Image (tube, grey):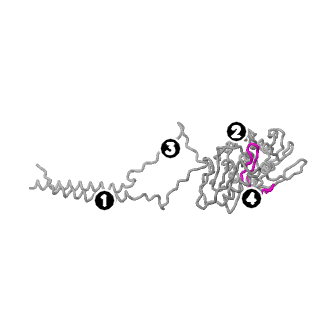
Amino acid sequence: MTIGFSSRSARSTCVLCVAGLLTLMPAAAARAGRPDPGPPGGTRAVAPQPSLLYRSGTQVRPHREAPEVPEVSALSWVVADADTGEVLAAHDAHRKLPPASTLKTLFALTVLPVLPGGIRHEVSADELSGVGPGSSLVGVVEGRTYRVSDLWNGVFLNSGNDAVHVLASLAGGWTATAARMQAEARALGARDTYVRSPDGYDAPGQVSSAYDLTVFGRAGLRNPDFARYCAKVDAMFPGLDGDSYGIMNTNRLLTGADGVEPYPGLIGIKNGYTSNAGNTLVAAAQRAGRTLVVTVMNPQEGGGFAVYEESRALLDWGFEAAGRVDPVGSLEPAAPRPRQGPQAVPTAAPAVKPAQDAPGWPETAAIVCAAGLGAGLTALTLRLRLVRDEAS
């Protein structure tokens, strides 16, 4: 038996296949050519700009209308928004330099939470024996009983290294306090700081950076006790024989002492000086609902009070530049990196979506179905031809 299949039948069947394909292929092609519409609502996530804070020199991302960054002589400085943590501009932000008494900001962050102000303590000679020569002192004397709050006034206002030594002793000792300060710095994401002397007294290997000190200042403002102490202009300090004497904050940008004009809205934070570190300052100010933190380390020009004037210029710039610059980095600690090595927990691979979820699948399936339909019609035609031939 011979199965015949005329060229006419073949042409008819192929026309059906091609017609089905031509009907559905334009839709598939149009779908493939359309751009991905993105997430619902038409918005796409914008990747944050990379940090510039490890670059040398002055870093700023100004808009067209932004004011120019002032010329300052400090070896390192940072201007940051205390609320958001955004760094508006910086110069050698991570340069490691001796911090002087601005390191007392980290000391306070570490010790304030464990020493309530109402505690009373009689000072011993051992607690004062390690105070370095030439240190700034508030006048703590052995045998006198002080409230912890008095000692904190001595730390913040008079930058008293004697008060720091007593508080460190109460908190577990000099070495233990240094270790806890180091741990606190790392917990805050401050990785340029190495603590050797908790009072900021010059010591080999003791360094910090404008970035780290700004982190400490910002964190301090969130602690009500820290914020209250650092904003005090003056206080009474216990003296001998039950009397007291007045002490004044040595931050001249806060007090306006020695001919330095006080800065409007200033709320602290801490100044410092040693012959090795030069003048350093962490300052915070509020204006129109915004709080800025500025750190200036070791101005090279302008004398001993230049640190205040350069901080003033940077604060003025920061308030004027608000909303007119993009941040060059952040004070927020970076997310911890996943552990590596044999003990690391494997990260699950992203779930692979079924093939039917891929773009273009419905159209592809339709084309395949059309081709199948054409093949079926071909088989049906052949079958009818066979039956007709057998009948004849």
Q: Secondary structure at mark 3?
A: loop
Q: CA distance from mark 2 to mark 3?
A: 39 Å
Instruction: State which region is magenta.
Output: 256-283
Residue 190 spot, x, y in % from top left: 65, 46
**Which mark, by number, is residue 347?**
3
Residue 330's tag is none
Residue, far bottom: 288
How busy is the neighbourhood of tag 4: few (under 14 within 10 Å), some, or many (20 plus)?
A: many
Question: Quadrant location of the C terminus?
Answer: bottom left
For label 4, the residue is 263
Residue contact at pointers 4 and 1, CB within 8 angstroms: no
The Cα atoms of the two marked residues, 1 and 3, are separated by 42 Å
Identify the residue at the far right of this view. Answer: 241
- The secondary structure type at the circle numbered 1 is helix
Tell me where residue 115 appears, x and y as whole percent. 76, 47
Q: What residue did someone put label 2 on?
A: 205
Name the disc covering residue 24, or none. Answer: 1
Residue 264 on the magenta span: yes
Q: Amino acid at mark 3?
A: Thr
What amino acid is found at the position of numbered circle 2 in the picture?
Gly
Residue count near mark 3 (Cα–Cα under 10 Å), binned few <14, some 14–19, many ≥20: few
The residue depicted at 76 percent of the width and 55 percent of the height is 253
Residue at the farthest left position: 392
Which of disc 1 and disc 2 is earlier in sequence?
Answer: 1
**Residue 118 rendering spot, x and y as whole percentages:** 79, 50
Side of 180 relative to 37 (left or right): right
